[in-house]
Image (cartoon, rainbow, N blue to C red):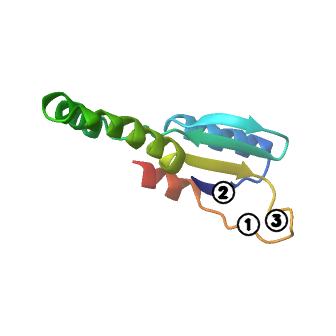
Amino acid sequence: MKLDVIYSKNIEDMENKMNKLESFGFNEKSSEDNFILARKREYGNIYIHIIIFIIALLFFWIFIILSPIYFIYNIFKKSRYVLITTEKKDKEGNDLEFIDIEEFLREKE
């Protein structure tokens, strides 16, 4: 799981950025007055799932267990989380490292 942090000036800006993220498949997981947490689930490449299934059917049925393992790996390790916040420091008082939303969306294309 990777957390990217995007800075917003105010609540309206935060909602506008969330709308941009929704067009790229992100869903709002939770929100409060000063932040929105969004998530995009990754399920793995469909072609890899198909190849694993074909190998399991034609050669070794034990390979069928690889597909759920690959699926679970992608859900927990490859899913992306984005925090849109108006805060500049974390709970301990350390500065947050922000990423620009335009740069983040270009990376997703």
Q: Residue at x 33, y 40 (%)?
A: 66
Q: Position of residue 19 (x, y in %)?
A: 61, 36
Q: Is residue 108 above or below residue 31?
A: below
Outermost left residue? 58
Q: Which mark is residue 57?
A: none
Given residues 1 and 70, the one toward you in this image is 70
Q: Secondary structure at mark 2?
A: strand
Q: Residue at x 73, y 66 (%)?
A: 96
Hey, what amino acid is under mark 3?
A: Lys
Q: Which mark is residue 5?
A: 2
User: How many neighbours does mark 2 have within 10 angstroms: few (below 14), some (14-19), or many (20 or more)?
Assistant: some
Given residues 17 and 58, the one toward you in this image is 58
Residue at mark 1: 96
User: How many neighbours does mark 1 have within 10 angstroms: few (below 14), some (14-19), or many (20 or more)?
Assistant: few
CA–CA distance in space, label 3 to label 2: 11 Å
Q: Position of residue 5 (x, y in %)?
A: 66, 57
User: How many neighbours does mark 3 have within 10 angstroms: few (below 14), some (14-19), or many (20 or more)?
Assistant: few
Q: Which mark is residue 89?
A: 3
Left or right, 76 with respect to 94, comes to left
Hey, what amino acid is under mark 1?
A: Leu
Mark 1 and mark 3 residues within 8 Å of each other at the beta carbon = yes
